[in-house]
Image (cartoon, grey):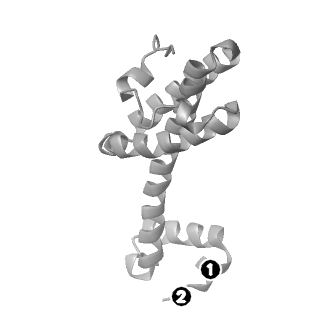
Amino acid sequence: MSCPLYDHDFYAWTTKQAGLLRAGKLSEADHEHIAEEIENLGLREKRELISHLTVLLRHLLKWEFQPVHRGASWRLSIANTRDALTDHMADNPSLQSMLEAGIDTAYRRARRDAALETGLAESTFPASCPWSFGQMMAEDFWPEA
């Protein structure tokens, strides 16, 4: 079922749907699109998890494999990304069940990105993530080659 408002003015659609739900007018609500949007919100949280993991892993790889370039900005980026991951996991504890697969996906991306950013061959970096989530998140963890 097509909903012209949903297709042409998403903001107006969201406002109308929120009003209908708050008023208890469930029969008038656009159930199909509401369900789709709720699912999309969940997917966004998963994508954000993978994005944070990718940034953290990329910086940890560069930290380990380019020790001469280590500096305060890398240390700050790693610390900030750890904080963002901590907050994201606290807000979405069910994402814990997706960590293993998320780390695999993020590491594949981080390995490629680290190779491009450093000019090192991708084969320089381990084929799979060498660290556990706990290691990556530990404030005192700074990988050494």
Residue under the point 43% across and 78% down: 32
Residue 14 can be seen, yes or no: yes
Q: Residue at x 47, y 49 (%)?
A: 45
Whole-percent x, y for residue 84 in the image: 52, 31
Residue, far top: 140
Q: Which residue lies furthest to the left in this view?
A: 97
- Spot occupied by residue 29 in the image (x, y as percentages of width and height): 45, 77
User: Hey, which quadrant is residue 96 in on the image?
Assistant: top left
Above or below residue 100? Residue 83 is above
Q: Which of 82 and 23 is in front in this view?
A: 82
Q: Which of 100 and 21 is in front in this view?
A: 100
Q: Name the residue under label 1.
A: 7
Viewer-proximal residue among 35 and 119: 119
Label 2, secondary structure: give it.
loop
Q: Which mark is residue 2?
A: 2
Residue 54 vs 27, above or below: the answer is above
Residue 90 marker = none
From the viewer's perspective, is residue 14 above or below residue 129?
A: below
Q: Which amino acid does label 2 sit on?
A: Ser
Q: How crowded is mark 1: few (under 14 residues within 10 Å), some or many (20 or more)?
A: few
Please tell me whether mark 1 sits on a helix, a strand or a loop: helix
The answer to whether the residues at label 2 and label 1 have Cβ atoms under 8 Å apart is yes
Q: Is residue 40 above or below residue 75?
A: below
In percent of the image, x 70 and y 33: which residue is there? 119
Query: Residue placed at 46% from the left, 36% from the top?
Result: 88
Residue 78 lies in quadrant: top right
